[in-house]
Amino acid sequence: MIEQRRMLIAGNWKMNLSLDEAVELAASMMEYSSATAKLDIALFPPAVYIERISSLLEHSPIIVGAQNIHPEEAGAFTGEISSKMVLTSGGQMVILGHSERRHIFAETDEFICAKVKRAILSELTPVLCIGETIDQRDAGETNRVLKRQLEGSLDGITIEFPGELVLAYEPVWAIGTGRVATPEQAQEAHAFIREWMDGRFGRAGRDCRILYGGSVKPDNAAGILTQADIDGALVGGASLKSLSFGGIIIEALKILER
Ligand code: PGA
């Protein structure tokens, strides 16, 4: 079982890198394997690379995951991938409800919820992303939006252990924009999410890991990761270079070793 709220540094590669580049990046991340004595590291390559990357990392404690799955087990869903495909390719986690899926591909909370259910049923750990747009924040609606996304994306879901579900707070306005939330803004949202999780799932919910995502870089990681309710980072752009992703891991280690 995962130790309570173990720090997790996750890299979402999105739709980037050729196969050779992906293999080279994953291989260079092995240099940071020893950091897993203190924290978890996960890489989320494009689906077609999962098998190759997880084979490469077979003897490394670095976790590999997918960026999406379809809620159904199998069937006529051209272009989609199932939880079983991810699992049998060596994936252990899956990002669900990412803001790019919500906004570019119009995924609803209901659809995301079906995927979360499938992932948990398949023993694939979901990293459920939620977050408000800048207009919603400016209108003072942040908590209302987070609550709506949590209620909708976790409707009817039960968890027994905190390790069954990871959440990621990703303010839409901070993703890929270079505009990171202040540590105080992030902490405030995380505290709200944790309280909601406690009310909804009790102890198992309260101890779920909640990652922050949105323009995390080595130079702003410490401010974010030292916040009481932040258990790690979901990193996009900075995860595409071993130096910057590794830099975030080093910042996380410094905090844990304090
Ligand atoms: P970013 O992406 O670090 O490039 O802002 C974060 C994410 O989308 O998970």
Image (cartoon, rainbow, N blue to C red):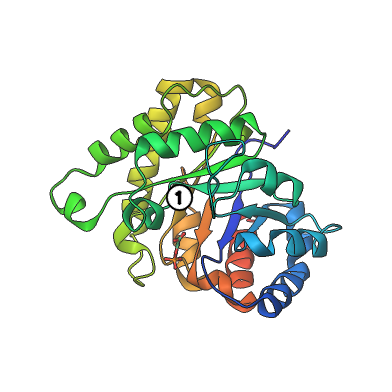
Cβ at disc 1 under 8 Å from ligand 1 = no
Res. 161 image quadrant:
top right
Q: Is residue 231 visible?
A: no
Name the residue rendered at 62%, 59% in the picture: 47
Give the total of numbered labels. Answer: 1
Image-based side of 80 in relation to 145, left or right: right
Toward the viewer: 253 or 214? 214
Residue annotated with mark 1: 227
**Amino acid type of disc 1?**
Gln
Q: Is residue 55 above or below residue 8?
A: below
Image-based side of 174 in relation to 159, left or right: left
Toward the viewer: 223 or 242? 242
Image-based side of 139 in relation to 147, left or right: left
Q: Is residue 210 above or below residue 42?
A: above
Name the residue rendered at 78%, 54% in the picture: 61
Neighbour tally class for label 1: few under 14, some 14-19, many 20 plus, Cα within 10 Å: some
| Name of the residue lying farthest toward the front | 76
Q: Is residue 152 above or below residue 140?
A: above
Which image quarter is the N terminus in? top right
Q: Is residue 226 visible?
A: yes
Residue 140: percent from left, percent from top: 16, 45
Residue 57: percent from left, percent from top: 80, 61
Residue 149: percent from left, percent from top: 34, 37
Q: Tag 1, which secondary structure?
A: loop
Name the residue rendered at 38%, 29% in the picture: 196
Res. 23 image quadrant:
bottom right
Picture quadrant of ligand 1: bottom left
